[in-house]
Image: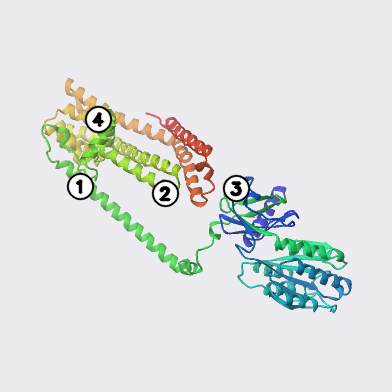
Amino acid sequence: MSRHAAVAAVFACVSVLAIASPRAPVALAADEVSIREVDVAEFPMVRLVVSTQEAVALDIGDVELLENGVAVDVADVYPLGVGIGGVDAVLAIDVSNSMRGGALSTALAAARTFLAGVPASMPLGVLTFSDQPVVLSPVTTDRASVEQAVASIGGSTSSGTALFDAVAQAAALFEPGAEAQHNLILVTDGRNTTGATDLTEAVATAREARMHVFTVGLAGPDTDETTLRMLATETGATYAAISADELGSVYAGLASEFTQQYVVEYRSKAPLAAPVTVELRLPVGSATIGFLAPGITQLPAETHGAKERLSIWTEPVVMGVVVGLTFLTVVALGLLVLEFDARRRRERRLRSRLVPVVDVGNPEDAYRPDRTTFIPDRVADVAERLAGSGAGERLSRRLEHAGWALRGGEFLSIVAISAVLSGLLGSVAIDLVGALLGVVLGVTVPFALLSRAAARRQAAIQAQLADTLMVIASSMRAGHSFLQSLDSAAKEIDDPAAGELGRVLTEIRLGRDIDDALEALVGRVGSQDLEWAVTAIKIQRKTGGNLAEVLETVAKTIRERETLRRQVRVLSAEGRISVIVLTVLPILIAVYLMLVNPEYLKTLTTTTPGIIISSVAGVLMAFGYLWMRKIVRLNV
């Protein structure tokens, strides 16, 4: 196996252990300071249970946290038992024949030292084990009964060592579902020789009970150090291999460690399902621990009742019915949209042929689409005056290109309303920076939609132009006049070209000059090919000649140009897609991080350097977008 494969396998094993037991640490820290537990049940809020060998009083100012090398703010620090439960423990003492004599007497003396070193309010339990575990005292706060249970052990021993059964029996002594930190202190000088439980079952039972097994192996020929060490590390505890004389100091150290425990809370900036390394620095020492942030599927539901209510929707039959109904609904909506679009096309074609006369003296007003906006005329007039004559004319021309039945002032009023609403929504959802982003989006999106609509309509007319000229030329070859040919093209060609030709005919019937009406058509459409065709028509009308032949030649040229234009679009497709991806992807990632982990980007939105960086990045992104658009836009 290669070195990279081995590293990947180790990391995968660590990740699985972290997911299976969210409170079990990946590695143990130094002796002075250790991180006993990591609670990610309310992620991104993370709780660290920290123990110290020295008696210290900690507050927020004494704690420094680094997450993946980046400093994070500490939300709260309090003694264990105030926020997420207290501490309890069970003393498990080996009373097999190998412990007879001094070893057992030393173990009993060390147990009494432990009882004297922990607070009287700490719940404790006692059991012994040889060929089977025997509970001498349940987990209780009655210290007198616990001391009496230790004293009752005496010096009697028996054969056999049911080590794993003792672990399972100790886990059963703790109250199920309790938020306390459960600990088992197990001392032995041998190995498991009997019982119905094996090592895997013992570890699983301890994890299910959230019990930390502190194993103490007295030096001897039969001590199974490998098993004791695995039992401790797999449950997030420690193993000590000592002589009988050192047992008292080990118990005293554990008593101090259980007593001096604090809960350190902080809000993680790490994304979901990402590996996290936390370094804790205290005045008395430091410790480091690693864990895996939970994924979306591991986040706790609000209630168990909600899970039960949702479980029915995971049934295959129910899911199939839901999918089928959803599909039928989408198909029905699609058919309704198509029917609505067809009806709208028929109505538009009918209006283009039956245009009401508005003012014979002003043919431009003879074909004015009905406006149904909610913007009052006075507000629209004020907006047009504020925009200025030049900008207002360009905007009105752009609205004509898009085919929108809006005045320039009405569109500017809609943009202002969109900016205000987007700014308010951004300020409520995020903060001041969100309000600024909302205003920018509220102004940009309407203009982007207008530009897209104008481009699509111009492209549609451009695609119809060659066929339109051929219809006019064919009608003229059949003996019709130019105006009759225009009328035939307006009837045979689909929208949007049909509507524009109908408007030209209406203006001519109302007394406008043919050349002026055609020039107005060029201004409304904004097509260079159409401009060339209109120029050819005007020249032919002044000089004479075969107009049908001229239009056929122009149509052939336009088809060739359209073919070349499509080839260029195909060749530049990759560049245009890159423009969209490079522009939209950072924005989508930022929005995703703000929704999943709001604190992750807080530095960029709440600090002065972060705001400056964000502003500069936004300007550079806009400049890069315009630059890339200029590169991939090829005029043919």
Q: As shown in the figure, which amino acid type bears the numbered disc 1?
A: Glu
Label 4 Cα neighbours within 10 Å, binned few <14 / some 14-19 / many ≥20: some
Q: Is residue 84 left or right of residue 588?
A: right
Give the label, 3 or 1, closer to the camera.
3
Q: Amino acid at mark 3?
A: Val
Q: Secondary structure at mark 1?
A: helix
Numbered disc in front, either 3 or 4: 3
In which quadrant of the rendered view does residue 215 lie?
bottom right
Q: Is residue 288 left or right of residue 97?
A: left
Find disc 1 in the rendering and name its residue: 347
Mark 4 secondary-structure assignment: helix
Give how far apart the Cα atoms at labels 2 and 3 are: 25 Å
From the viewer's side, name the closer residue of 329 and 566.
329
- Name the residue beneath numbered marker 2: 428
Looking at marks 4 and 2 on the same chain, the residue that comes earlier in the sequence is marked by 2
Which class describes the residues within 10 Å of circle 2: few (<14), some (14-19), or many (20+)? Answer: few
